[in-house]
Amino acid sequence: YSMEMPARQLQFRFLSQLGRLDLQALLRGKLQDDDWPKLQAAVAVFNKMMDRLAVDDSANLTPTSLTAKARRGARKY
């Protein structure tokens, strides 16, 4: 994982890890038949996690803006 990684790429990485799926197969849409139930379970877990997880892929995020966004998020939830 990287600070420069776009949110979409993070989502795919999370799903591949949660479902124990091959990331390249997931990215290419070349999953095996027995991978689909794993993906469905991973998506369900991921959706539940999104209530508690914030991903900000905005460019040029400074420590000050990160702190401000974190505080706003903490007040919101």
Image: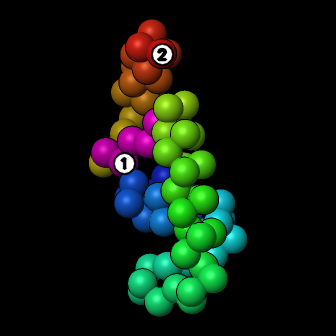
Left or right of 55 in this view: 36: right
What is the residue that sits farthest to the right in this orientation?
20
Query: Which is more foreground, mark 2 or mark 1?
Result: 2
Q: Secondary structure at mark 1?
A: loop
- Identify which residue, 72 or 22, lies in the foreground: 22
Which residue: 48% across, 15% down? 77
What is the C-alpha distance between the residues marked 2 and 1? 20 Å
Which residue: 62% across, 69% down? 38
Give the quarter of the figure containing the N terminus.
bottom right
Amino acid on which disc 2 is placed: Tyr
Q: How many marks?
A: 2
Which residue: 50% across, 32% down? 51
Find disc 2 in the rendering and name its residue: 77
Does 44 appear above or below 41?
above
Mark number for residue 73? none
Does 7 appear above or below 74?
below
**Residue 67 placed where, x, y %?**
46, 23
**Quick one: label 2, few (<14), some, or many (20+) residues within 10 Å?**
few
